[in-house]
Amino acid sequence: MQMDGTAMRDRLTYHPDGEHVIYFDEKGHEVFNSFVNVRKSIAGEDVNDFCFFDVHGYMYTNVLTYNQDGTALYYANPYGVMERSGWFQFAEGAGGVAGALGITEGTWGYAYSDGRVDPESIGDESVKNSFKPNYTHQHIWENVGHTEPRYYRVDTGEDVTDGQIVAVDGQLCIITGYIGGYQCLVCGTKVNSAQEIDDHVWGTHNGEANYGTWQEPIYVAVTQKSIYVEDYQRCISCGTRK
């Protein structure tokens, strides 16, 4: 949440650890394990960058990685932005699959406008001079979804539907059953059987009509958790959905 109490949307920001960069989408949900077309920088400036956020929500920086299908390479530079403007050079200490491909600082690569790094382009100056780009658009999929509340019994962990939930003194609960019996209408004494209330009324108040029945619900506390639900995937390059 921001200082004014509203959710941060379409923005990069720092993780509470002060080190990693994370992203909140247009609905104010943090993004995990997905490519994203980032439209606002941390400073709030308009940008048009492709970035990837891992399973922890952290932005990839200085990493050469495959897409989620394992069919295309992408390079997130030290600023976390996917290269997609032709020739570039890898930075020192590039991670991911860079080491396995023999990439060191200064190695050249060629990235198409959809962010794909052509494997044939990776190499030294001689490769750069001989490589001929062969562009065919490939989709870069980002997950688009939302979070939903889920409710669970604290005693058994079983799922609970919204319609079962009641609030008791500020605690979310469900009613699992009822207990009841007889109650003296004079003093409020509660007992379980007709014989007990009869003995009580005649023995204490000497009045046959001075009793009624009582019933109380049995409450079990409920806990709430939020889960991420994926609605669809969208290409951050061309907007195609699947």
Image: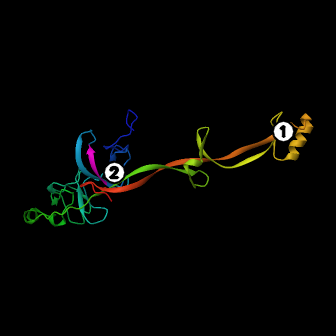
Q: Residues within 10 Å of mark 2 (few under 14, many from 20)?
A: many
> Marks 2 and 1: which is nearer the front?
1
Residue 159 location (% of width, % of height): 56, 54
Q: The C terminus is located in which quarter?
A: bottom left
Residue matched to label 1: 211
Q: In percent of the image, x 61 and y 52: which residue is there?
A: 155
Q: Name the residue: 89% across, 42% down.
A: 198
Say whether residue 74 is left or right of residue 186: left
Q: Residues within 10 Å of mark 1 (few under 14, many from 20)?
A: many
Q: Is residue 104 above or below residue 26?
A: below
**Residue 47 vs residue 242, the one in the foreground:** 242
Read off the magenta span: 35-40
Q: Does the magenta segment cover residue 38?
A: yes
Left or right position of 226 against 45: right
Which quadrant of the figure has residue 98?
bottom left
Can you tell which mark lies on residue 58?
Answer: 2
Q: Could you tell me residue 125's position as x and y percent?
A: 9, 62
Queried whether the magenta region covers residue 80, the answer comes back as no
* Residue type, numbered disc 1: Tyr
Name the residue type under label 2: Tyr
Q: Which numbered disc, 2 or 1, marks the residue that appears first in the sequence?
A: 2
Residue 90 at what x, y percent from top left? 18, 57
Q: Is residue 222 visible?
A: yes
Q: Quadrant of the N terminus?
A: top left
> Eyeballing the image, is 136 above or below 34?
below
Q: Pick the residue in front: 76 or 10.
A: 10
